[in-house]
Amino acid sequence: MLDSEERQLQQLARTFTGREIIPQAAELDRTKAFPQAIYNQALALGLLNLTVPESYGGAGLGCLALTLVTEELCRGCVGVGAALSINSLAADAIIHHGSEGQKQWVLPRLVAGELASYAATEPGAGSDVAGLQTRAARDGDDYVLSGSKTWISNANRASFFVVFARTGGGQAGEGGSRGLSVFIVERGTPGLRVGEPLDKLGQRCAPTCEVFFDDCRIPASQRIGEEGQGFRIAMDAFDHSRPMVAAFGVGVHARCLEESLAYAQTRQTMGQPIIRHQLIAAKLAEMSTSLEAARLLAYRAAWLIDHGQRNTLAASQAKLFAAESVMAAATEAVQIFGGMGYSTEYPVEKLFRDAKVLQIYEGTSEIQKLVIARELQR
Ligand SMILES: Cc1cc2nc3c(=O)[nH]c(=O)nc-3n(C[C@H](O)[C@H](O)[C@H](O)COP(=O)(O)OP(=O)(O)OC[C@H]3O[C@@H](n4cnc5c(N)ncnc54)[C@H](O)[C@@H]3O)c2cc1C
């Protein structure tokens, strides 16, 4: 199914993960340190910014390539994988909707190693994108942003923020989805402030922060697309990002299977390795089957968009299935390890903690079901 170039890229990422990520994953989880050295090495190897066009210094590859690499990185540690791949959320909005000037301004700097954050979620609006309240008021040739965002990945390291804000519709809800626009804000702009990283259950080396806009003035030339197109740009971004986020889950799922299989072959109870007990063997069989299904759904959603086909349904199905099946796999992995599954001595308790957020970010599982049901009715 994959061509030789894709297999090579996958192998490169696999080798890198085994050598650089797996040995450091537990320590990064403990210290919550951003994996800067790993980032620099992955950048030098050409594993990052894959979808940035060659004319801006990127690899010019598609969503499938990104999905393949992301899966491998996340097999090592999904916190590292997330920290390394978040740029693509912001970059894709600029690649697909930005002006030539915006592309020339931001994309080469991302390729050179700078980071960008995607800032949609607010304390009062996560699933309800159309209800967000950060305002961007037009003032001559500028916009003035006020409001706050939360849970913004890599925000404490980002040079650029792709920010969703309300330009029309009065209060949140009045203008609904039509009142939103999207802007690029550069770190250092007066009125922009980033909070300390939030403490969280899993993916602890991937920082997430609050971001505050206090009369933050930016030129109108930093608006991406037309005024009022923000909601459409956000939904379009999901079509590109959900296959990649599904691959976050596939990576963790693959690791759950790997660790569980190895443990089940060595741990003995009642005179035999636990894999010989049918109830344990059945868990492994189910884990491997759902892994293959999740992987194929992710690849398919990525392939469709790479071939110019609408993938909203496929991307939500892939994200939903990957998130639900990895959580089930991580739960069973802990079970297969018994008491040792609950210990930090083995990696499965981290896989369990890391897996949970896959049902929450990039659209919760409930929201994916709403999207799928809506798509079925089209
Ligand atoms: C680690 C992490 C990293 C993140 N990174 C980013 C980032 O980089 N950029 C960014 O913009 N955001 C980011 N987010 C935010 C994330 O996308 C939101 O948390 C998510 O969309 C859910 O929004 P919420 O937290 O406001 O939950 P809510 O929207 O309040 O949902 C609460 C519950 O209600 C359910 N629910 C809500 N509406 C409906 C409905 N209509 N029907 C049925 N059920 C419903 C939800 O599924 C959920 O179970 C991140 C979050 C986390 C935890």
Image (cartoon, rainbow, N blue to C red):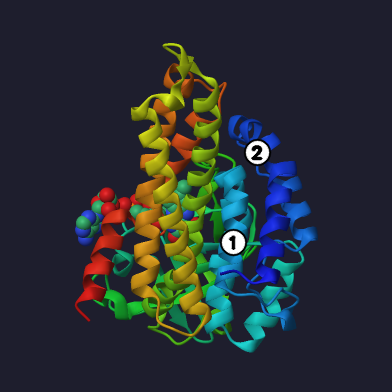
Residue 377 placement (x, y as % from top left): 19, 77
Which residue shows up at 56% across the image and 45% down it? 79
Q: Quadrant of residue 86?
A: bottom right
Q: Quadrant of residue 88?
A: bottom right
Dot 1 falls on a residue whose secondary structure is helix
Residue 106 placement (x, y as % from top left): 67, 74
Residues at circles 2 and 1 in contact by the CB criterion of under 8 Å = no
Residue found farthest to the top: 270
Pick whichever of labels 2 and 1 is earlier in the sequence. Answer: 2
Q: Amino acid at mark 2?
A: Ala
For ligand 1, the image quadrant comes to bottom left
According to the image, label 1 marks what residue?
68
According to the image, label 2 marks what residue?
33
Which residue shows up at 42% across the image and 72% down it? 234
Looking at the picture, tell me which residue is in the foreground, 233 or 188: 233
Which residue shows up at 46% across the image and 24% down it? 341
Q: Residues within 10 Å of mark 1 (few under 14, many from 20)?
A: many
Residue 49 placement (x, y as % from top left): 67, 67
Rendered view: 64 above or below 227: above
Residue found farthest to the left: 377
Residue 295 image label: none
Q: CA distance from mark 2 to mark 1?
A: 25 Å
Looking at the picture, tell me which residue is in the foreground, 82 or 321: 321
